[in-house]
Amino acid sequence: MPQALNPEVLLTIVLNLPLINRIFEGDKCAVATLHRTMRQPVLLFLQKRGVDDDRAADIYAESCTVLLEAYYHGKLKPQHNIEGFLMATAKNLLYSEQRQTVRYGATVPDDYDEPDDLLDALDNMVLQADILKMANALLLIKDGDRNLLVQHAVEGIPLATLARAQQENENTVRQRFNRALFKLKAAIC
């Protein structure tokens, strides 16, 4: 009788293809799914090779960075085996580190400046994608309504002040703002 698949493995198989696409589309849940499904196997793989927990976590983070950069630069397609790529990258980073240790006696030079944390980099990518999506959605809204949205939501100018400046009824301005905000939300989603 065939053995039932582990739910985590099944989740990885089901979500593998669109997962990396979803990360670049700004889906924060996709980042969590990548970490939930891949972190433990990569860490176990490294720990079996004698890597301590902290260094294994660092190598995992570097591997994720390489994975995302490879996809971003078109070197990795969603149909590739993402798990295999991540494991091979972790293995290669480990071996490279071991070779450096043998050659130079240290893995990281003393003056090495640590790059931004992986999660910060992913958050920045998500934020940039959100900003681009917002900018494109704002282009779909009439100029007057777009100015109203920006002045109230971004600059914090009260609607009553904007209504007085435009010599309009405050309720009319509030309704225009709400309609514009609804259009913006619909355009973003």
Image (spheres, grey):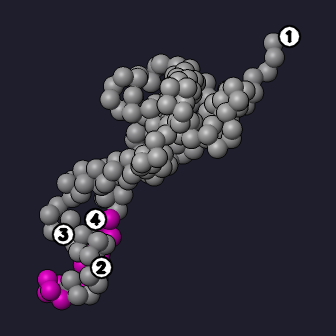
| Mark carried by residue 147 | 3
| Mark carried by residue 180 | 4
The residue to which callout 2 is attached is: 156
Coordinates of residue 186 in the picture (x, y in percent): 35, 54
**Chief secondary structure of the magenta portion:** helix
Q: CA distance from mark 1 to mark 4?
A: 59 Å
The residue to which callout 1 is attached is: 1
Mark earlier in primary sequence (1, 4): 1
Q: Which amino acid, mark 2?
A: Gly
How dense is the environment of label 2, judged by Cα within 10 Å: few (below 14), some, or many (20 and up)? few
Q: Which residues are magenta?
A: 164-181
Q: Is residue 97 visible?
A: no
Q: CA distance from mark 2 to mark 3?
A: 12 Å
Q: Which amino acid, mark 1?
A: Met
Q: CA distance from mark 2 to mark 4?
A: 16 Å
Of residues 98 and 133, which is closer to you in this image? 98
Coordinates of residue 13 in the picture (x, y in percent): 61, 24
